[in-house]
Image (cartoon, rainbow, N blue to C red):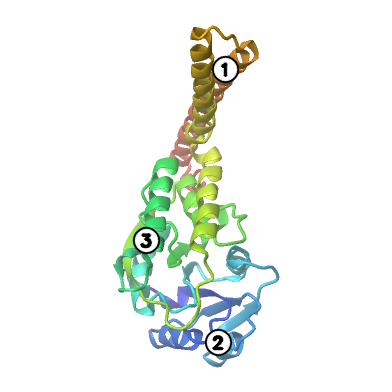
Amino acid sequence: MKINKDEVTVFIPTLNESPTIGGLVREFRELGYNHIFVMDGHSTDATVAIAEKEGAMVRIQAGKGKGDAMMEGFEMVETPYILLLDGDGTYAPADADLMLTPLFNGFDHVIGNRLIHAEEGAFSRLNLLGNYLLNHLFKFAHSRDLQDILSGYRAFKKTTIHQMHLTETGFEIETEVSVEAVRNNHRIKVVPVTYRKRPGTDTKLNPLHDGYKIAVTIYRLAKMNNPIFYFGIIGAIMAIIGFLTGIVVVVEWLNGITHLPLAVLTVLLIMVGVEIFMFGVLSDMILAYHREMMDEIQRINPEIPHRE
């Protein structure tokens, strides 16, 4: 199906992007996208003035952080389709049609995979390693390979946004969006896009600090999406600690030394670890049953949104 660009809002969250925002808005307008919405996070440079001069609608977010900007902006968009990208010039407007075509063909959510066609120098070795590890952690925790969960180039139907329960206010928002898309069984398409070297603005991402926060988010959100993974890790850690203390107890006992308190602790740790793991198994069974019920309800009545 042909793209109707009048039904698309190009949504660009910004913070101090004056070197790139003007050219970005101008390129999209030249491509025929007239609904360009900039949500600015209190920039201290000329980002707002430049975006308005180029014809974008600009709003200043009430809160702080990229996630907050996205959540506020989603509520303001009125068109049925949204194309989201960062304002730092790393994503190419020329890929817009590639991103939007799957939506007009029935998909709910499109992710631009940066890792295939990245320009030389666009990623440091640390960033590439971090992306590789986080994508594999997501695949393991949420049973879905989305290839590039941290991509800032995405396209959505507005109806699918309304099905997501988003709460993350910082850079963890991309992870949460990916988790919510999987949890709601959205039809997701991943397409390769060009990722360009940052052309004049400093990165706002700290690879180690933010990478850690994203990893924690992937694990924390698995509680509702893959409980056997979430509770299984807790149970396994406790059981392993119990086995280690048990080894100490046995070795000391063979040497004629009895550690009764440590022996009791060993048994408790192993028992609690196994119980937590079993709780994860039961939770996973309940979740599977819930999903089957929602799928059956949707099959009977297709007007009901995808399972949540």
For the residues labelled 3 and 1, the Cα–Cα distance comes to 41 Å
Q: Considering only vertical position in the picture, is 11 above or below 57?
A: above
- Name the foreground residue: 273 vs 40: 273
Q: Which residue is mark 3?
A: 128
Label whose residue precedes the other's in the sequence (3 or 2): 2
- Type of amino acid under label 3: Leu
What percent of the width, then of the height, locates residue 289? 49, 29
Residue visible at 39% across and 54% down in the picture: 188
Foreground tag (2 vs 1):
1
Quadrant (top left, top right, bottom left, bottom right) of the N terminus: bottom left
Q: Which residue is mark 2?
A: 51
Helix, strand or loop at label 1? It is helix
* View extreme (bottom): residue: 53
Left or right side of 263 for 24: left
- Type of amino acid under label 2: Ala
Q: Which residue is mark 1?
A: 266
- Type of amino acid under label 1: Thr
Q: Are marks 2 and 1 in contact (CB under 8 Å)?
A: no
